[in-house]
Image (tube, rainbow, N blue to C red):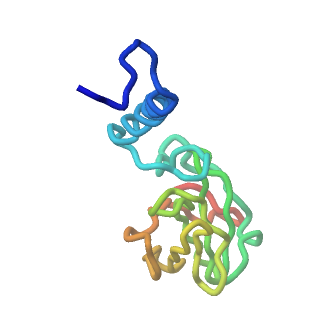
Amino acid sequence: MPTNTPTTGTRSRRDVLCGLMVALVAPGALVAACSDSEPTGSGEPAPTNDTANNSGKSLAKVADVPDGGGLILDNPGGGKILLVRNGTEVKGYNAACTHMGTILQAPKAGLATCVNHGSQFDTATGAVTKGPATKPLLTVTVKVDGDQVVLA
């Protein structure tokens, strides 16, 4: 019975390369398929909303958060926090995009934008205003204490 594959115990270059590709690609695909976590997409620590052990910890001076805008800073519990200010009111959000976890840009005109895929979030509510993200930003509870913004 004629075949294109040698039967003398040698393998064709194509067989070797295909086997090598399967060996290199399959484990990564298997790990990704079996993983129960979402990618963060930025090399940042996994986003967290755990602030219980850091309650009262100062994040920034109120004056350092632009009125009508905001800033991104380190979350003592891991990841990044987006602080936004409107007058004397300051809100906090997890700064990771809910689509793939990329850290958002500091807000402009009331919107925080993800540089990877263009998702936008309303900084007054955390709601998605433009996808591909479908989930709102996670709230990080903060409060103003004197001239400081602290974790609540």
Task: Tell me the residue at 40%/13% (across/down).
Answer: 8
Q: Residue furthest left?
A: 1
Above or below for 118 versus 39: below
The image quadrant that residue 67 belongs to is bottom right
Residue 51 versus residue 129: which sits nearer the camera? 129
Is 69 on the left or on the right of 56, as rendered? Answer: right
Task: Tell me the residue at 59%/84% (across/down).
Answer: 110
Q: Residue furthest bottom?
A: 109
Task: Tell me the residue at 63%/63% (across/down).
Answer: 145
The quarter in which the N terminus is drawn is top left
Residue 78 placement (x, y as % from top left): 58, 45
Residue 58 placement (x, y as % from top left): 67, 53
Above or below for 106 versus 75: below
Query: How many numbered marks, from 0 up?
Result: 0
Above or below for 34 versus 121: above
Residue 27 versus residue 57: which sits nearer the camera? 27
Q: Residue furthest front?
A: 2
Task: Tell me the residue at 65%/62% (across/down).
Answer: 149
Is 64 on the left or on the right of 141, as rendered? Answer: right
Residue 122 placement (x, y as % from top left): 51, 80
Q: Residue furthest right?
A: 64
Residue 82 placement (x, y as % from top left): 60, 65
The image quadrant that residue 99 belongs to is bottom left
Is 147 on the left or on the right of 23, as rendered? Answer: right
Residue 136 versus residue 119: which sits nearer the camera? 119
